[in-house]
């Protein structure tokens, strides 16, 4: 089934179909046109284009704000961290305590304020870089660890492969959130311990994925050919197995950024991770719990922001998966 | 019983036990990597950052933390299989006793949520498949993409806000009406004393888990006022769990329904002149449901994790609520015990799903 049919079948897509082709055989051709093709396709699809725009905005803001916060931290000018924000996210202002969302003093009160009178909007913007960093760092570390472990296990097989499969089975038996809670409480409170525990539990899925790729690739013609030409295994893995197995993982990874943000903010909701007064999307939501039905904006708006970002990642991942033509097996 | 069935059964059970042992090993290794010395470990077990050295020594003695690692691991595994997870740092009673009381409440919630999720998922999934590639299909897809991307706590908050506080349909929080006393737990298991000592702890835990969810207690004791109130309080959190997890069921149902609708027997049913509804929701549906069984274990794990948050929001005092308290109190022994017990539950759910699948689809047994 060609790309056009896939697109038509899964999406009812009525726009112009991109002309680049994804072919199963010539792997080289696919790799060259791959990323341009995805981007082209995503931009031509309206929903995915909006999602991509929101994610780009989120990432760009996170880079700018994160850099400012880091520079401010390093040069001991903390105020630099909120130079771009509508108001200071950690300054107490009880005069404005529990102000409902309104357009006065635009945009400070647009999402309301919490009990301490801090603007929810400023706090959301201030916390964004931490979520973006967690998402990108955890997924990329997962891909790198999973790629190394999974590819070698799949390519060489034998008892190492068997052990790896059992270990990943055991990891995947537990819901990630439960294991993350155990590890990050053990590591002590703080942002770094959450990151470390997420990285520790995130790689097994990717290891299984890359193992499956290596298993299917190692019997393909071009790998056999380079084996016959006398290349050693390491070079074959670097030259052929790695580059060809990365491509399909992108769709899953796009979806996975959202999963990381969900897990990370759920951990924050449970009080693990960044501690007050510094804001965090999940913990902002849980801090509003005692004030809940009356001051609903405190809990609900951070949740809605998390949902928006995750939906965008999911949409992009979903469209990419459609493009690749079917679900990934791992 | 056929030989192939027996082999299938034995293989699945061995698989589950190996996975469980490895899980315990992984947790053991991770704990010992993060806290490599006996004193560091004791500080974690103590549950307080300012533990006096004398107390640390007591803990090291008590838990045998200075023994060689393989010996410690053997002790750890043996203790777990005896149901001995240590003494809770807060309540000063054995951990299994605390969790034994709370786990049934959580299981009640999670299983009800799962049933809701499967019902919603099957329903929406088959509607989507029957109306493939038209606006109904797309709107169902849009709904589940949003719900599975929503954080669990947001779903909880929104359901609570609208169904409990705005429309006042259901009570917003709690296990049951607090003015009603708890029904007395079903007691006295005479057959338990016949079981060898080491297994008694586990078996009584298992029996309690089956007989002691408060709703079943109430039904057994005939306390119908408590039962009705309990069901009333159960619906909202269970619905929250269902909303976050039904999307996976919808997606798989849709895919397998579409697959089934292309099969020859479905075409034959059409040719026999059966109505579209009859074919789609009767013939094709019955065969498309089978793959959903494999999802049970996955959903069970996902919902158990979600229950931690849901129980915190709805003040539903089960194991999830206890987990949140343990996080705040740095009750590390409790967290480790919960992790392993959740692991055991999920592995057991996996085993059940595998066996069910083998029963529903005999081809699997021959693999």
Image (cartoon, rainbow, N blue to C red):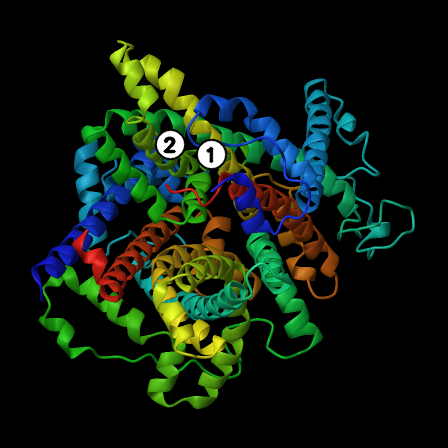
- Would you name the residue on which mark 1 appears? A249
Q: Position of residue B264 (x, y in %)?
A: 35, 64
Give me the C-alpha separation between circle 2 and circle 1: 8 Å
B92 shown above or below A246: below
The extreme front residue here reads B271
Report the chain holding disc 1: A
Residue A260 shows up from this direction: no
Residue B52 shows up from this direction: yes
Report the chain holding disc 2: A
- Secondary structure of the residue carrying numbered label 1: helix
Whether pointer 2 and pointer 1 mark residues with C-beta atoms closer than 8 Å, the reply is yes
Give the left or right position of residue A102, taking residue A295 as reference.
Answer: right
Q: Position of residue B4 (x, y in %)?
A: 11, 58
Q: In the picture, residue B363 is in which quadrant?
A: bottom left
- Secondary structure of the residue carrying numbered label 2: helix
Return the disc, 2 or 1, that comes first in the chain's sequence: 2
Task: Using the image as rendered, state which of residue B303 and residue A89 is in the foreground.
Answer: B303
B9 shown above or below A305: below
Q: Position of residue A260 (x, y in %)?
A: 53, 41
Task: Using the image as rendered, state which of residue B112 and residue B68 is in the foreground.
Answer: B112
The local crowd at label 1, few if under 14, some if 14 to 19, many if 20 or more residues have their Cα within 10 Å, is: some
Q: Which mark is residue A210?
A: 2
Q: In the picture, residue B69 is in which quadrant?
A: top left
Q: Quadrant of the N terminus of chain B?
A: bottom left
Query: Residue drawn 70% across and 61% down?
Result: A291
Task: Using the image as rendered, state which of residue A103 and residue A186 is in the foreground.
Answer: A103
The extreme top residue here reads A230
Query: Residue drawn 61% across and 37% down?
Result: A131
Query: Residue drawn 61% across and 58% down?
Result: B138
């Amino acid at each position: 089934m060609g790309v056009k049919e896939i697109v038509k079948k899964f999406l009812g897509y009525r726009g112009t179909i991109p002309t680049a082709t994804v072919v199963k055989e010539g792997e080289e051709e696919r790799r060259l046109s791959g990323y341009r093709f995805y981007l082209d396709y995503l931009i031509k699809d309206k929903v995915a284009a909006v999602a991509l725009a929101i994610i780009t905005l989120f990432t760009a803001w996170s880079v700018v704000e994160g850099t400012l916060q880091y520079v401010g931290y390093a040069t001991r000018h903390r105020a630099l961290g909120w130079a771009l924000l509508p108001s200071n996210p950690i300054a107490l202002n009880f005069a404005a305590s529990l102000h409902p969302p309104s357009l006065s003093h635009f945009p400070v009160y647009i999402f309301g304020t919490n009990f301490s009178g801090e603007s929810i909007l400023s706090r959301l913007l201030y916390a964004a870089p931490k979520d973006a960093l967690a998402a990108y760092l955890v997924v990329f570390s997962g891909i790198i660890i999973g790629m190394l472990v999974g590819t070698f296990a799949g390519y060489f097989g034998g008892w190492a492969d068997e052990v790896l499969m059992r270990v990943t089975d055991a990891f995947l038996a537990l819901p990630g959130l439960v294991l993350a809670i155990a590890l990050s409480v053990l590591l002590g409170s703080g942002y770094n311990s959450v990151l470390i525990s997420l990285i520790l539990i995130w790689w097994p899925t990717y290891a299984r994925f890359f193992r499956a790729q290596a298993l299917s690739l190692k019997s393909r013609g071009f790998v056999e050919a380079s084996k016959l030409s006398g290349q050693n295994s390491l070079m074959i893995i670097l030259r052929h197995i790695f580059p060809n197995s990365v491509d399909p993982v992108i769709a899953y990874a796009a979806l996975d950024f959202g999963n990381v943000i969900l897990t990370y903010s759920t951990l924050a909701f449970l009080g693990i991770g960044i501690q007050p007064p510094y804001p965090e999307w999940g913990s902002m939501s849980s801090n509003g719990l005692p004030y809940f039905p009356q001051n609903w904006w405190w809990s609900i708006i951070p949740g809605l922001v998390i949902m928006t970002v995750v939906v965008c990642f999911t949409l992009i991942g979903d469209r990419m998966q459609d493009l690749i033509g079917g679900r990934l097996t791992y | 019983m056929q030989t192939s069935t027996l082999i299938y059964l034995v293989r699945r059970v061995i698989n589950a036990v190996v996975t469980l042992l490895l899980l315990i090993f992984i947790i053991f290794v991770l704990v010992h990597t993060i806290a490599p010395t006996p004193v560091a470990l004791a500080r974690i077990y103590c549950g307080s950052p300012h533990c006096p050295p004398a107390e640390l020594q007591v803990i090291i003695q008590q838990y045998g933390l200075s023994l060689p690692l393989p010996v410690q691991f053997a002790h750890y595994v043996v203790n777990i299989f005896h149901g001995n997870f240590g003494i809770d740092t807060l309540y000063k009673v054995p951990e299994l006793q605390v969790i034994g009381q709370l786990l049934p409440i959580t299981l009640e919630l999670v299983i009800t949520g799962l049933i809701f999720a499967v019902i919603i998922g099957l329903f929406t999934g088959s509607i989507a498949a029957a109306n493939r590639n038209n606006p109904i299909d797309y709107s169902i897809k849009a709904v589940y993409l949003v719900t599975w991307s929503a954080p669990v706590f947001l779903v909880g908050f929104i359901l609570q806000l609208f169904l409990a506080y705005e429309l006042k349909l259901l009570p917003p929080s709690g296990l049951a009406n607090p003015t009603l006393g708890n029904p007395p737990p079903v007691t006295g298991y005479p057959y338990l004393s016949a079981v060898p000592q080491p297994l008694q702890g586990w078996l009584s835990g298992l029996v309690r888990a089956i007989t002691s969810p408060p709703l079943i207690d109430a039904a057994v004791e005939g306390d119908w006022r408590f039962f009705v109130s309990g069901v009333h309080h159960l619906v909202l959190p269970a619905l929250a769990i269902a909303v976050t997890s039904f999307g996976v069921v919808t997606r798989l149902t849709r895919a397998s329904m579409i697959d089934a609708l292309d099969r020859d027997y479905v075409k034959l049913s059409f040719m026999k002149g059966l109505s579209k509804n009859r074919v789609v929701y009767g013939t094709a549906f019955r065969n498309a449901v089978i793959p959903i069984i494999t999802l049970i274990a996955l959903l069970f794990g996902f919902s158990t994790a979600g229950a931690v948050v849901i129980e915190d929001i709805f003040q539903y005092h089960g194991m999830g609520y206890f987990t949140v308290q343990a996080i705040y109190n740095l009750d590390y022994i409790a967290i480790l015990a919960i992790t392993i017990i959740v692991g055991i539950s999920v592995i057991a759910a996996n085993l059940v799903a595998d066996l069910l699948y083998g029963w529903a689809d005999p081809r699997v047994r021959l693999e």
